[in-house]
Image (cartoon, rainbow, N blue to C red):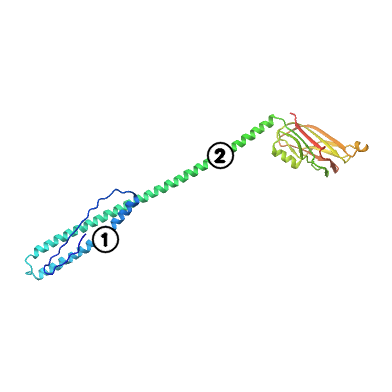
Amino acid sequence: MIECPQRHKQKDFFWIRIHTKVRVRQPLPSWNESFLDYKEKNVLLVDNLKRLEIQYDSFKFGAIEYNFRTQKYPNEKPSATQTVDSLQQKLHTLETLVNSSHSQEQARNQDVLVLQTQMETNTKLSNSYNNLTIQLQTTNNNLNKRSMDQFRALEGRLYNVENRQKLLTGVIGLFACVSSLSSLNQRTTIKYQKIKTSEGITNQYLTSFESSGVFVCEVPGLYHISVVTLSTTHRASVVIYLNNEQLLRGHINDYNSGNGVMYDIGVGIVVTKLKRDETISIKTGHLDMDIAADDSCLTIVKVG
């Protein structure tokens, strides 16, 4: 604490009383608290410095005035020289305090800048660590997802290979019939939608057969194919096709109708080699015809 100088009426001299306080720097508990403490102390130091500068200017002005009066009235005070020396010494002391305050202010500002730089560096490191953590988590999640997808794909392939192996080594057979009385135009594919027996045929191929009436070979080999057709259309025929080529025509005779029976039967039987994805289909012949349900059936069996 510095008290402002005062001039006495009877004596031309200045007096100054300086009180100083010493603060012990405590350990910095944290970056934020240290920064705030430095900032608060810096503000107080700047205020003290301004007060010292004001007092210094006042003392300096008083010394100039006193010198002027001494030169103008040399016989006014016998101890003028001693008083001036004392005042100059006090001014010198005050100037030293001002310079010291300047140095302390600069040092404190430098400490604040260093602390602020450290805080910014710490913040950047914290942000970098958080970003790296997020990246590692994202990468780990992506790797886990990719691994699961690959595992499921391999599992599906293994399942298909096992099924294919069963098909190659197992029995393949199909027995299906017409589900309802049908009136079909000539050269129309007959659909056998009532599946009575299916062995060694995957669901995909079986569903396709039900909707289209076309049998698609999954496993190459030698196949026995037989068709039985019950119809009221006499002298009609049904044709067995391999892909789009005719293998056999089975005719509907009129023997039963000549003996008072409405339905006649036509039969066709072939044995042929089939390659993978080759097709077997049964179509009506050169006449429109009616086909009875349940007793008009198709049988396909792999025999070799």
Badge 2 amino acid: Met
For image coordinates 24% across by 57% down, the residue present is 102
202 sits left or right of 109 in the view:
right
Q: Pointer 1: residues within 10 angstroms few (<14), some, or many (20+)?
A: few
Badge 1 amino acid: Asp
User: Which residue bears the numbered disc 1?
Assistant: 47
Q: Quadrant of the N terminus?
A: bottom left
Specify the farthest residue to the right: 259
User: Which residue bears the numbered disc 2?
Assistant: 148
* Mark found first going from the N terminus, 2 or 1: 1
- In the foreground, 19 or 246: 19
Percent x, y of residue 285: 84, 40
Q: Can you say whether 251 is above or below 13 in the image?
A: above
276 sits left or right of 290 in the view:
left
Per the image, label 2 sits on a secondary structure element best described as helix
Name which quarter of the figure residue 242 lies in: top right
Q: Are marks 2 and 1 in contact (CB under 8 Å)?
A: no
Q: CA distance from mark 2 to mark 1?
A: 68 Å
Percent x, y of residue 68: 13, 69
For image coordinates 17% across by 58% down, the residue present is 93
65 sits left or right of 174 in the view:
left
Percent x, y of residue 224: 77, 31
Specify the farthest residue to the bottom: 72
Per the image, label 1 sits on a secondary structure element best described as helix
